[in-house]
Image: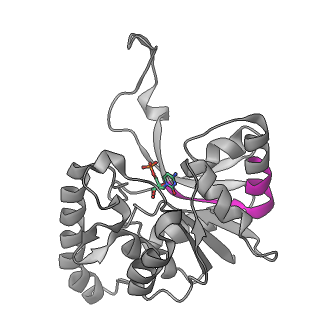
Amino acid sequence: LKVTAVVPAAGSGTRMGGSTKKQFLTIGGTPILAHTLMRLAESPEVTEIIPVLPPDELEALLDSCVECSGVSKVKRVVPGGKTRQESVYNGLKALGPDVEYVMVHDGVRPFVPLELIEALLHALPGHDGAILAVPSKDTVKEVNHDCMVCRTLDRKMVYLVQTPQVFRRDVILDAYRRAFADGFHGTDESSLVERIGGKIKVVMGSYANIKITTPEDMALADAIYNKEKGDAPKLRAAGGSR
Ligand code: C5P
């Protein structure tokens, strides 16, 4: 498959506190977004990456992050919108005419393993989309606005959804057009495709594929980074790809 990746990274990162937007905080001296771009670029099937960046700092960020990642698959960047959904839509509108498959991946998920990107792409044929998700370790309850329990979901059937999410181009474009026309707002791409009847395959993700959101996540991110760095020589010795 030939895939274009849209990477929303235009959030204000207000839950992180501090003045640096979270996608540009560093892990091991490299901005989070640069880590993310390098991961996606490892996949031979991802032929172009379109980062969606905060509009006010587009040029500066292009230099500091996109160029520092050294990723030649980034040929252009796109300004983000007020919501994640708007940011992704801006990325989708920038797709070239010959793009057949679109992957969307959060700029703040720097640890997605190449094996999972590949597993996701292999799962896509025959479906409208494929998404990474992990089984919930906790019991999940639906509550009402007063925080009273409505019901308990069967934990075996509950998955926590991550990115990347990958779709056929015509399907995700149609889903986005119709969501905006209907005033529907979803928290992931798949929910937009589901509501127009799309069939989505769930592929096992990884608990290490975290989304960096709050300050506690930075400590976890450093720990995952250091562990992966420590594991890398062992993996190579065992014939692994990294
Ligand atoms: O806010 P949340 O944690 O869901 O953000 C997920 C990703 O979406 C982040 O990489 C963030 O930068 C991006 N985002 C965006 N445009 C917005 C809000 C969030 O690209 N307006």
Residue 169 within the magenta-colored segment of the rendering: yes
Image quadrant where one finds the C terminus: bottom left
Q: Position of residue 174 (x, y in %)?
A: 80, 51
- State whether residue 67 is above or below residue 6: below
Residue 171 left/right relative to 87: right
Q: Position of residue 13 (x, y in %)?
A: 37, 52
Outermost residue to the front: 56
- State whether residue 180 is above or below residue 171: above
Please name the residue shown 35% across and 83% down the image. Answer: 240
Please name the residue shown 60% across and 49% down the image. Answer: 85
Residue 229 within the magenta-colored segment of the rendering: no
Q: Position of residue 25 (x, y in %)?
A: 29, 66
Please name the residue shown 71% across and 46% down the image. Answer: 193
- State whether residue 228 is above or below residue 106: below
Q: Position of residue 148 (x, y in %)?
A: 39, 10
What span is in magenta? 163-175
Q: Quadrant of residue 224?
A: bottom left
- Which residue is more in the foreground, 42 or 118? 42
- Which residue is more in the foreground, 192 or 63? 63
Please name the residue shown 51% across and 68% down the image. Answer: 117
